[in-house]
Amino acid sequence: PKRPIDKPLRLPLQDVYKIGGIGTVPVGRVETGKIKPGMTVTFAPAMVTTEVKSVEMHHESMDEAIPGDNVGFNVKNVSVKDIRRGMVCGDSKNTPPAEAANFT
């Protein structure tokens, strides 16, 4: 199947680490869209917005991550307590993720 690169970014968090000297590093798999260093992202449902400093896969820096990539990305000024597993990361400029009104 074709990778959904043209859709808005959705990246569910699998874990969040705090790494000394680097800071907070959320980890997850890109489902749709792309994530790049320098992007402004929003974590739903906490609605925490921050900038992506770097994106890494297997300890190697990447210019961008596409759907299917398991990545860790470094974020500015966000505590490990603010975001946690299960939250969804999205691009704050291009249809950021929102809470569901209801489930049927």
Image (cartoon, helix red, strand yellow):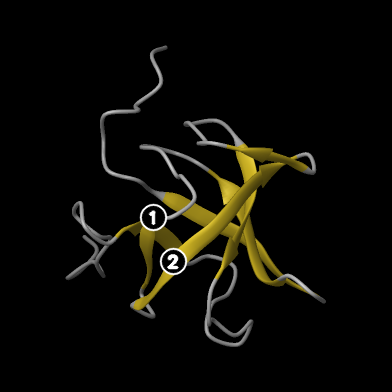
Picture residue at 58% right of the left edge, 74% below the top:
84
Locate residue 95: give its quadrant. Answer: bottom left
Q: Residue furthest top?
A: 1
Relative to 90, does residue 85 appear above or below in the rendering? below
Picture residue at 33% right of the left edge, 78% below the top:
47
Q: CA distance from mark 2 to mark 1?
A: 6 Å
Task: Label 2, secondary structure: give it.
Answer: strand
Relative to 46, does residue 35 appear above or below in the rendering? above
**Marks 2 and 1: CB-CB under 8 Å?**
yes
Residue 59 horizontal/vertical position (percent)? 79, 44
The amino acid at mark 1 is Met
Disc ID at residue 39 = 1
Q: Pick the quarter of the image with the N terminus.
A: top left
Q: Nearer the viewer, residue 45 or 40?
A: 40
Residue 18 horizontal/vertical position (percent)? 75, 75
Q: Nearer the viewer, residue 40 or 3?
A: 40
Q: Nearer the viewer, residue 100 or 91?
A: 91
Q: How many marks?
A: 2
Locate residue 97: give its quadrant. Answer: bottom left
Picture residue at 43% right of the left edge, 55% below the top:
38
Task: Label 1, secondary structure: give it.
Answer: loop
Disc 2: which residue: 51
Residue 40 horizontal/vertical position (percent)? 36, 62
